Image (cartoon, helix red, strand yellow):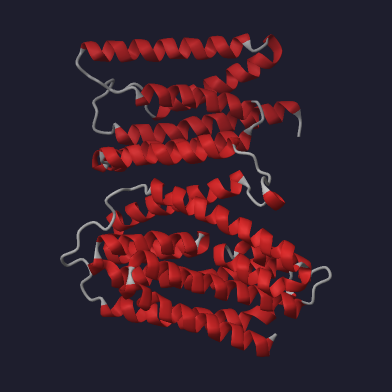
Amino acid sequence: MSEEYLAFYNLGVALAIGLLIGVERGWQDRDAGEGARVAGVRTHGLIGLLGGCCALLAESTGPIALGLGFAALAGVLATVYVVNLRYDQDVGITSLMAGLLTFSLGALAVMGELAIAAASAVVTVLLLSQKPRLHGWINALEKRELHAAIKLLLISVVLLPVLPDKGYGPWQALNPYVIWWMVVLIASLSFVGYFAIRIGGTRRGMLFTGLFGGLASSTALTLHFSRLSRINRQLDPVLAVGILFACGTMFGRMLLVSSMLNHRLFELLLLPAALMSLIVYLPAAFYWFRQRDPSSGLGSPLANPLELKTAVLFGLLLALVMLLGRALKAGFGESGLIALAAASGVADVDAITLSLARMSAEDLVPGTAAMGIIVAAAANSLAKAVMATLVGGIRIGLMVGIPLLVAALGGVVFAGFWA
């Protein structure tokens, strides 16, 4: 492709970007009279083309041409805005920002970043078109919800990246990054669950939260939902559905993770994992359909969008279990692999699943690895049954504990014959 043809092509993309944004701006201001809006379809198209031409000119004269073009456009748009204000026509600053962004994206296209410019233009149009919905969300947002979102960003975006990702203490068992990541995960589950229940209602919200919790951390979700049971006993059936749904999803995630590292484990784990999931899903379905009107007489199950204190306490508990797990490994060695799997599974299934799957691809017998993974899942299920009983009480403990106990025993016995 010749340089001249490439320049024309890039200028065409810059023009198309301006027209795309101009269509959205023109449609938003379609009821405004002639001259009452800052820029429409034609103007945005020309702005995009102007940005492209300035970028093309900057290739021979230097970046000063691009800067002067941007400054001149900003001055023109600001002047039009001020003039409209004199006639009490507040067109808003969004149109001004859209014009400046159109210029920048047009220049970016001519500079060769076509994919970035085009994708940014589409995202810009999507954002501009969602004004009513975004304003509706902001108006519906409560002060405590906004503060909870800021706290979640603080502990995840600000604090988590600066923590060291290496082991400390005896056997280097305590990893600050991993432990705080679990704290962030639990807090995020609390946050997502709050809005899932608020948007979808108690019944559907619990189900969706259970699904995402099973994909992330069924242990964290069990702890969180068990604590909610203490707040409102009427929520026990739907909370049990969420816990069991998350626990059943965990078995599928375990199968997927291990099979990605060693495909031979898929056939060894498929039937035991399917059996354990079925045993857990059936009572969840029973509780789900039995709860005909779960919203009757129930208030909001979550008073606080971010259960940070509970998350920190769970982080401390996780650190203790990690330390005990390393101590057990040091005492038994590799010969105690199944015991190690059981001890590790109490706190987390993923870590031992990944370790055994990697080992089975090298020098460990796949049948032994599969048995260890099932034992870890069974130990984790029993731990969640105990956790639900201790934290949530006898009622929810029985509702989720019996299915988890049967699933753990059934999975281990079946895996013993199958593997």
Q: Where's residue 88, x and y in %?
A: 19, 16
Q: Nearer the viewer, residue 133 or 170?
A: 170
Q: Residue at x 39, y 47 (%)?
A: 309
Q: Where's residue 89, x and y in %?
A: 22, 19
Q: Residue at x 34, y 37 (%)?
A: 147
Residue most toward the bottom? 417
Q: Residue at x 40, y 38 (%)?
A: 151
The quarter holding residue 346 reads: bottom right
- 406 lies above or below 304: below
- 222 lies above or below 79: below
- 199 lies above or below 280: above
Q: Where's residue 87, x and y in %?
A: 20, 13
Q: Look at the image and tell me whether residue 130 can be seen.
A: no
Q: Nearer the viewer, residue 149 or 87?
A: 149
Residue most toward the left? 297
* Quarter containing the N terminus: top right
Q: Nearer the viewer, residue 336 or 67?
A: 336
Q: Where's residue 215, x and y in %?
A: 51, 62
Residue 159 appears left or right of 74: right
